[in-house]
Image (tube, coloured by chain):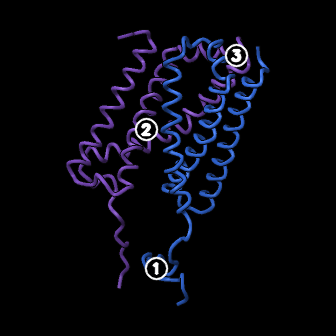
Chain colours: A blue, B purple
Amino acid sequence: MSIGESSTPLGKVRGLGSAREGGVHWLTERVTSIALLLLGTWFIASLLLLPGLDPHTLAEWLSAPSGAIPMALLIIVGFKHALDGMKVFIDDYVHEPGSNFVINTLLLFLAIAGAAIALYALATLAFGGAS
Amino acid sequence: MATRPRPLSPHLTIWRWGPHMVVSILHRATGVALSIAGLAILAWWLMALAQGQEAYATFSKVAHSPIGLIVLIGLTWSFFQHLLSGIRHLVMDSGAAFELGVNKSFAILTIVGSILLTVLLWAWLMGVRP
């Protein structure tokens, strides 16, 4: 019996050895979570400390560098962390390789599209497209 | 010899429920809620702001409706629950807080903390000042 071919699940796992990947994914999830601890706190604190939550005040806040730059980081890191987390969720419950690939690819596209939409909106505010 | 199914690791149904188990499940559930609903609303909110008065009025109207408020309060709680149990996970990743008592108290604290922070935040947003 060659390596990777075995009659029992345990034997299969032993034959395959370690996946030799996943460490970066695991660590990235932790690092982005620490960043989101800071960015999330900034976001909540900003909403609480703004003089009002009317669209004019909000647009002014996000068009200044002090609001736009952390918000850009929150969008990028937030979508990355969500994507990494959702991958764990999908991998835990969708075992069939074909469906797993399809769903994970859809998730990747959704995350990138979502981040692009949010960043486009933020750029419009920051660079003065809207009144 | 007849083959019988190999034993698998025990699943949800076999464990006695405890705070650590609730918090673990909540961490995953709130993470999925924030990833899907949370980020979708964030993107919509920014887009509405960028598109001006009319678009923002639509967003604001939905956000202030009963269902909108329930979703927003739910997401606020999800955010704090995920944040606090995320801190708990980071501590546990370092190898600490695995003692039964400490682990249990820490798990309960994340739930108490997330509810408290949600109440405080929404009280503030609704104009309550100390």
In the rendered image, which quarter contains the C terminus of chain A?
A: top right
**Tags 1 and 2 in contact by the CB under 8 Å rule?**
no
Q: Residues within 10 Å of mark 1 (few under 14, many from 20)?
A: some
B53 horizontally vs A28: left or right: right
Residue found 70% across the figure and 11% down from its top: B53
Spatial distance from mark 1 to mark 2, Cα to Cα? 37 Å
Residue found 36% across the figure and 75% down from its top: B4
Figure label count? 3
The local secondary structure at tag 2 comes to: helix
Amino acid type, callout 1: Arg
The chain ID associated with circle 1 is: A
Q: Position of residue B96 (x, y in %)?
A: 31, 54
Q: Position of residue A17 (x, y in %)?
A: 50, 77
A55 horizontally vs B89: left or right: right
Amino acid type, callout 2: Leu
Residue reaching furthest to the left: B101
- In the rendering, which numbered label is found on residue B55? 3
Residue bearing mark 1: A14
Q: Position of residue A18 (x, y in %)?
A: 50, 73
- In the rendering, which numbered label is found on residue B83? 2
